[in-house]
Image (cartoon, rainbow, N blue to C red):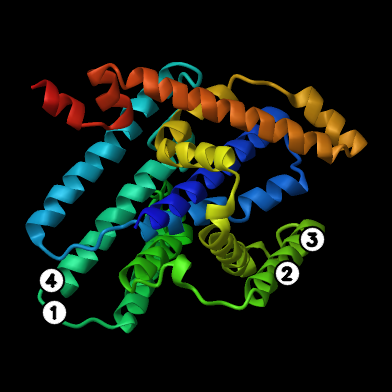
Amino acid sequence: MGQRFTYIDQLKGFAMILVVAGHVMEFCLYNKEYSFLHDIIYSFHMPLFAFLSGLVFTTLFDYKQVAIKIAKQSCRLLVPFFSMGIVYICTIRSGESFLFQPFKQGLWYLLFLWECYFISHIYNVCLFGKLKKRTYLFDVCWVAIVFVTVKLMIVYCSVEFNNVVGTLHLLRLYPFFFLGCIFRRMKCLPPQWKINPWIPSAFCLIWIILLWNIKVIPGKYLFKFSFVIETSAIFPIVFIFSKYGNRMNKRVSDVMIMFGKYSLGIYMFHRFMTDTLNLYIIGDYIHLTGSYFVEFILVFTIALLMCFLSVGLVKVLSYNNFCSFLLLGNMDCLMKRT
């Protein structure tokens, strides 16, 4: 069990670094055109997060246990979602909309994750609460039902409603979340995979080829092959971390585990930093000169600094019970206080 959570925290930390690096390029470095490094990161980092979230999802069938779990997850995710959104639009994005924006000023994943938890809990309780057996055909049908329902919402509901609910994110990422749930439930976790190393290598090759085609002919294959691209990247990454994560340098491993454990705080606080850092001059220089090695070093150095600063902010705020509850969704501190 310890090894299992270790590699998951390492993966979450790795994915969190990629998220921050992607935002550094998108909001700090480049104004319009993005580099190939940006395309690589955005091709799999959020599907990887969704898969990992499903991999740690606990399947419950009792109504009372599910109600308690949903209440805790609502506190953990929705309280920071609304409180940080209000802080965000009252400070560096004053006057802009929050709920009616599809990306929720960068906080959309909190709402998306809560929706995934809620939908999956309802599925488990309503369909399998009284059944002794279940087949994976039901799982496939459920994903298809969710996909069709969300697609119909996009077509027939108003743009404002879809923006509030975040239907585009559900359409794209819920299959990855539910795939992680299936892997967890069938106890087919990555450390147990007995796979020929050529298989993840083939997935990597497919991923590179498809990404290269998209870069050469922008938008032509993006929608058609997006699921293949994301799966081709996720599979070898999860396989490598689960098999060889324990061989990683201890300091590097400890940093990734720390970022994984504080991923929620990093996700929320780094956006304040990326919105106040302007490096467009350097971005123009990189585009003109093709200095992509400089880009790589600069982007990931800034991303690591932002991750460390965000972790520090989380630790400082955790000393105050009210801030810990309001900004981090930590309900235990208030319960202890009362």
Does residue 227 appear left or right of residue 32 in this picture?
left
Above/below status of 115 relative to 102 = below
Above/below status of 73 relative to 308 = below
Across and down, in percent, residue 282 comes to 80, 26
One can see residue 284 in this view: yes
Q: Residue at x 27, y 59 (%)?
A: 119
Q: Name the kind of residue labelled 3 in the image.
A: Ile
The residue tagged 3 is 217
Q: Name the kind of residue labelled 2 in the image.
A: Leu
Instruction: Kindly identify which numbered label has been placed on residue 205.
Output: 2
C-alpha gap between disc 3 and disc 2 = 18 Å
Q: In terms of image quadrants, where is residue 199? A: bottom right
Mark in front: 3 vs 4: 4
C-alpha gap between disc 2 and disc 1 = 42 Å
C-alpha gap between disc 2 and disc 4 = 42 Å
The residue tagged 1 is 131
Across and down, in percent, residue 112 comes to 38, 49
Towards the viewer: 286 or 309 = 309
Q: Name the kind of residue labelled 4 in the image.
A: Gly
Q: Name the kind of residue labelled 1 in the image.
A: Leu
Across and down, in percent, residue 265 comes to 41, 31
Q: Residue at x 23, y 81 (%)?
A: 134
Towards the viewer: 201 or 102 = 201
C-alpha gap between disc 1 and disc 3 = 50 Å
The residue tagged 4 is 129
Does residue 189 appear left or right of residue 338 in this picture?
right
- Marks 3,4: beta carbons within 8 A: no
